[in-house]
Image (cartoon, grey):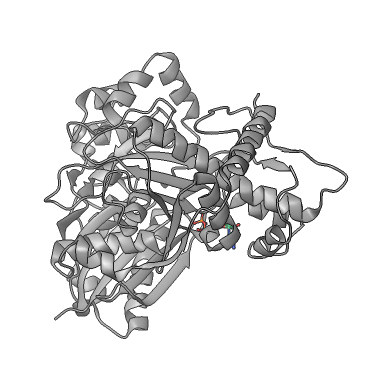
Amino acid sequence: MKKFVLALDQGTTSTRAIVFNKKGEIISKAQQEFKQIYPKAGWVEHSPQDIMGSTVAVIGEALVRAGITAADIAAMGITNQRETTLVWDKKTGKPVYNAIVWQCRRTADYCEKLKRDGFSEKIYNKTGLVPDAYFSATKIKWILDNVEGARARAQRGELLFGTVDTFILWQLSKGKIFATDYTNASRTMLFNIHTLTWDKELLRLFDIPKSMLPKVYPSSHRYGETDAGLFGAPVHVCGVVGDQQAALFGQLCTGEGDVKNTYGTGCFLLMNTGGNAVKSRNGLVTTLGATTAAKSPQYVLEGSVFVGGAVVQWLRDELKIIASAEESEAHALSVKNSGGVYVVPAFTGLGAPYWDAAARGTICGITRGTTRAHIIRAALEAIAYQVCELVTAMQKDANIHISHLSVDGGASQNGFLMQFQSDILGCNVVRPRVTETTALGAAYLAGLCSGFWKDEEELKKINAPEKVYSPDMPELTRFELLNGWQNAVKKTLS
Ligand code: ADP
């Protein structure tokens, strides 16, 4: 009887492996950071060798720390930084270029041209995405256009494309598995999320041969085995899922209207909209959620807050008015309210629902009585206001009223922030016991597929809420605060 499930989380700054037992408890963890490569302003790359080296190392280390062998693993789930693009040789496995990271802006001008040429609607209608340099399509095109000989080799069928999951699967299986899942495919800007196929017209537009593309399966699926020589025994890969959709599944937001928010450097808010691919009127993207094979496609509305926990880093590193992120909570709680102060951290412009790239931040409402604590509190409140505005936009788009918000990520540990979030949303905010929801989601999907866990009902019992925050603010106060926030935002718009 195999007693464990392994999750591999290949993220933007580090690669982690976590071993879970049947109760969903963490048995061991291993993590390796790797180099960020910035060849030019706005360009970001990773070394494919670093991605694979750290992957193999952390899996081995997690097994050793747990005191188990690969033969004890019932199934492995892979979750990964989305959109990051690799192109490699079909025979040798050798990448033709570094991995181009999702954050990389090198194709931004080309994306602006796509918009000017009127392709936005077509792309949105097929892929659910707004043309942007984030997504893989223009990164693949860049490699084919700029790496010597790449286009000719691609046309001869010698090159393969993959997001990070596909590259890892291919490498760990020594070229036997060439596949991805719906969630990763839906972030390439090449995948039609309605027909669930690679889109011929978009492949033509970006001049990408279809022979480069992997097969696409549901997130919970038997993808195949890792090469037996790697970890001492083959490991069955039964789950593949992009990081944000992994967190949504890890929070068991599997029903229509379920919403999770991850409070990291930025915030990622995802709403499950069930079988409906909801069209957004607020600039949110529509994407595919993680499913088991038996379930028909599930759609998700996704939005992000550019500056989430990063505003706390700014208080610490630039303003130097706190020594640690954790300290912000005590300062915020030391005052009754923000004293009319609002911090709008539009450091790099504002996203949904404002979409103003030229907006810049502001602190307003300052009086002679304003203290450091008021500013710290206002900065934390700003995270909650921004999330609240995204939730409101999603509720309008999907015509769904949410019952509660599931939370995770570093800043979800801040009790003041969670209570204020609940107050300002007017609904419960639920933080689970295991907040490693990204890895947990990948583990759940793999474990469900392999029969390690029976069904979602069983999973619901294993990660009970650690804390539920309930709204405790008079409706009038809530209304006045939101009003004040919106006025402050107006001051930042370009
Ligand atoms: P990422 O995955 O984006 O690196 P994490 O989930 O690790 O992010 O969260 C880190 C972010 O959360 C940082 O921006 C940090 O400032 C913020 N953060 C961490 N702990 C707290 C806290 N107790 N209160 C407020 N913010 C916090």
Question: Which quadrant of the structure image shows residue 192?
Answer: top left
State which quarter of the image contains the C terminus: top right
Q: Nearer the viewer, residue 14 or 482?
A: 482
The residue shown at (40%, 74%) is 29
Q: In the image, is residue 55 above or below residue 405?
A: below
Q: Give coordinates of residue 264: x percent, y percent.
A: 52, 54
The residue shown at (27%, 44%) is 256
Q: Is residue 414 left or right of residue 470?
A: right
The residue shown at (29%, 30%) is 127
Q: Nearer the viewer, residue 463 or 361?
A: 463
Indicate which quadrant contains ligand 1: bottom right
Q: Is residue 141 left or right of residue 456?
A: right
Q: Report the residue that reaches farthest toward the top.
A: 117
Q: Give coordinates of residue 232: x percent, y percent.
A: 22, 77
- Mark yes or no: residue 279 visible: yes
Q: Report the residue that reaches farthest toward the right.
A: 368
Q: Report the residue that reaches farthest toward the left.
A: 294
Q: Give coordinates of residue 9: x percent, y percent.
A: 37, 61
State which quarter of the image contains the N terminus: bottom left
The residue shown at (42%, 56%) is 11
Q: Give coordinates of residue 149: x percent, y percent.
A: 33, 34
